[in-house]
Amino acid sequence: MAQNDWKPDVPLEERKRRLLAEGALFRIGILEGRSHVRANLNAESLAKGAMNRIVGAVSSTFSGAFSGKGGGNLQSLSPLLIGGISLLSKRYLRKPLLYGTVISAGAAFAYYLTRRQDRARGPETLSGDEEISTPDGE
């Protein structure tokens, strides 16, 4: 209740009832806030938030590097580095991060090998018996 809402002609019982109702609403709001915080403070949601921040910082750094503008420097990336180091220090996150790293490295290596084999084959050369097809009018 604000200072301007107080009126001297309102009975004392009415003011008490109104204050109690406002207090009950305030407590309900606090309980809802606690439940939201508890729901978002688990390991999975924290890891997702950290990964989203890291991916965003990396993408903005590389997009700045490729566009010729100045990317992120160490001073702007240090909060992310500290957060990443603290996440790595958590024992329950080491195995999932290790598995993700191994799977990502395997996928990248497989992609590299397929690209290398495609380049090694090169474009198929035509023998003298085959005709090159050209569109009409050329």
Image (tube, rainbow, N blue to C red):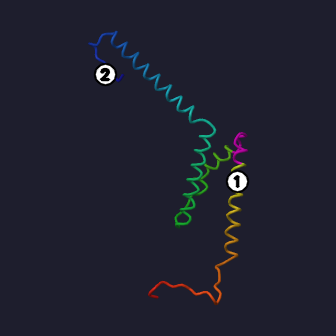
The residue identified by callout 1 is 103
Quadrant in the picture for residue 9: top left
Instruction: Give the structural element (helix, strand or loop) at label 2.
Output: helix
Which mark is first along the chain, 1 or 2? Answer: 2
Name the disc covering residue 51, or none.
Answer: none
**Horizontal relation, residue 24 to residue 10: left or right:** right
Question: Does the stretch in magenta take in 93?
Answer: yes
- Magenta segment boundaries in residue numbering: 88-97
Residue drawn at point x = 55 percent, y = 60 percent: 71
Mark 2 vs mark 1, foreground winner is 1
Quadrant in the picture for residue 62: bottom right
Residue 40, horizontal then vertical, whole percent: 56, 36
Q: Main secondary structure of the magenta part?
A: helix
Residue 76, horizontal then vertical, whole percent: 57, 53
Instruction: Give the structural element (helix, strand or loop) at label 1.
Output: helix
Q: CA distance from mark 2 to mark 1?
A: 63 Å
Q: Residues within 10 Å of mark 2 (few under 14, many from 20)?
A: few
Question: Does 30 appear above or below 132?
Answer: above
Residue 70, horizontal then vertical, whole percent: 54, 62
Question: Does 74 appear above or below 38?
Answer: below
Q: Could you tell me which quadrant the N terminus lies in?
A: top left
Residue type, mark 2 in image? Asp
Question: Does 49 appear above or below 19?
Answer: below
Residue drawn at point x = 46 percent, y = 85 percent: 136
Name the disc covering residue 5, or none.
Answer: 2
List the single residue furthest toward the left: 9
**Horizontal relation, residue 26 to residue 59: left or right:** left
Which of these two is toward me, 10 or 58? 58
Residue type, mark 1 in image? Ile
Question: Does 89 appear above or below 122?
Answer: above
Residue drawn at point x = 65 percent, y = 83 percent: 125
Which of these two is toward me, 120 or 75? 120
